[in-house]
Amino acid sequence: MPMSLHLKKNAGFTLVEIIVATGLFAAVMLIAVGSLMSIIDANRKAQSQQIVMNNLSAALESVTRTIRVGASYHCGASGTLTSPQDCAGGESYFAFKPREAIEGSVLSTTRYVYRHNTDASGGFIEMSRDGGSSWSRLTAPEIDVQGFRFYVAGACPKDGSIICTSDNVAASRLAQPRALITIYGSAQISAKTRTNFHVQTSVTQRLFDI
């Protein structure tokens, strides 16, 4: 009796199926890699922004802390720096008697000064510890400070120990010396990204003067 042999044919992948599968895999990987690179770039920008803004916060904190423990506030570049002076309209130049001069560790005529200045890279905050003879920069080059102003009231001593300038008003004698500080500008986060900032804070003289 003749015997017939039946062979079972094993099915495999066709060339078309392999091409389609490879294309889908490549598309998925391209999307995944693109998303990963976007996340890495966003994280890098966030870290850069945090570093830049931390520098600004540290500079402003240094300014307010030093002013708070000082005295004899003088707002504006006009007049004698050792004479208290208010400025209701705001000025970008502020001088005061530091704590070291109050305590006697330096000359009583010593004055610290803060001001807004500009150069080719933009605006910045700088400080002088010798009445304006020499200056040191407080903010990083990545920060462009476009405005930095002080609004001072109550600078004239209540005991009459110092003769105030004509810029002071009699009403200022009714309040503890205080300064309102405003600063605004932009910070370079990356080659194509800048972020704007606008900060306002107030400082009241710690040395009792009412």
Image: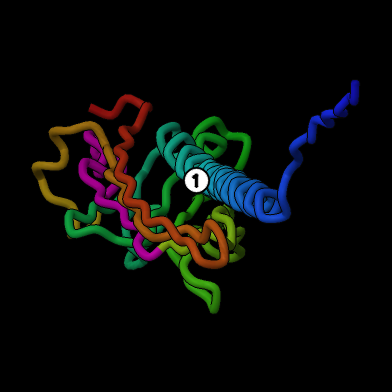
- Residue 177's place in the image compared with 31, above or below, is above
Give the left or right position of residue 109, taking residue 195 as reference. right
Is residue 93 covered in magenta?
no
Disc 1 designates what residue?
53
Total numbered badges shown on the rendered structure: 1
Across and down, in percent, residue 180 comes to: 27, 44
Identity, as a three-letter code, of the amino acid under mark 1: Met
Give the left or right position of residue 40, taking residue 18 as reference. left
Pick whichever, 18 or 64, lies toward us: 18
Work out which residue is located at the far top of the displayed protein and give it: 1
Across and down, in percent, residue 162 comes to: 30, 45
Across and down, in percent, residue 102 comes to: 49, 34
Which class describes the residues within 10 Å of circle 1: few (<14), some (14-19), or many (20+)? some
Dividing the picture into quarters, in which one does residue 173 lie? top left
Q: Look at 79% across and 35% down and name the residue there.
A: 9
Work out which residue is located at the far bottom of the displayed protein and give it: 120
- Residue 104's place in the image compared with 166, above or below, is above
Q: Look at 35% across and 56% down and name the residue there.
A: 184
Which residues are the magenta region? 146-163
Q: Look at 56% across and 44% down and name the residue there.
A: 39
